Image: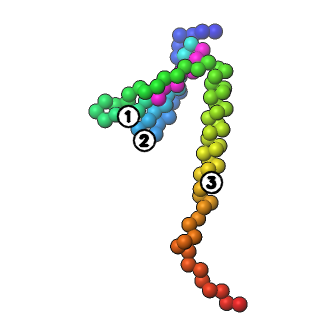
Amino acid sequence: MQTNRAVSFLPIFSDKKKVEVALKDDQAVIKLSTWVEDLGWCGQKTMSLDAEMLDELHRVLSAARLKLKREQVENQGEIDTSNILHFPSFS
């Protein structure tokens, strides 16, 4: 069923980027905007995806998110031991 009414979701913000998602004409429309001083939000890219492509995008984004989180945990596990003072042990 096609409808002319678009459904918008709350945008995702970072420092100077915004991602908006809306449903329009059986498509998910994803829009990336960046903040430019004196201009405001400027649209950079817009993608329209059908349900099948949206499923694949979700799968790829989930895999990328897991990989990034795994790398963050691994990097936090690395401790610089060059500045650690070892106290003598008395036996």
Q: Which mark is residue 15?
A: 2
Q: Which mark is residue 73?
A: 3
**Disc 1 target residue:** 35
Residue at figure coordinates x 60%, y 14% from the top left: 26
Residue at figure coordinates x 57%, y 10% from the top left: 3
As shown in the figure, which amino acid type bears the numbered disc 2? Asp
As shown in the figure, which amino acid type bears the numbered disc 1? Trp
Residue 17 occupies quadrant = top left
Neighbor class of circle 3 (other Cα within 10 Å; few <14, some 14-19, many 20+) is few
The percent position of residue 59, horizontal first and vertical second, equals: 67, 32
Is there CB contact under 8 Å for labels 3 and 2? no
Q: Is residue 24 above or below residue 78?
A: above
- Asked whether, in this view, residue 90 is left or right of residue 36, the answer is right
For residue 1: magenta? no
Instruction: Look at discs 3 and 2 and give the one toward the viewer.
Output: 3
**Mark sitting earlier along the chain (1/2):** 2
- Asked whether, in this view, residue 12 is left or right of residue 75, the answer is left
- Secondary structure beneath label 1: strand
- Secondary structure beneath label 2: loop
Residue 67 occupies quadrant = top right
Q: Which residues, given as a range, are shown in magenta?
A: 26-32
Residue at the outermost right position = 91
Quarter of the figure that contains the N terminus: top right
Is there CB contact under 8 Å for labels 1 and 2? yes
Magenta part mainly helix, strand or loop? strand
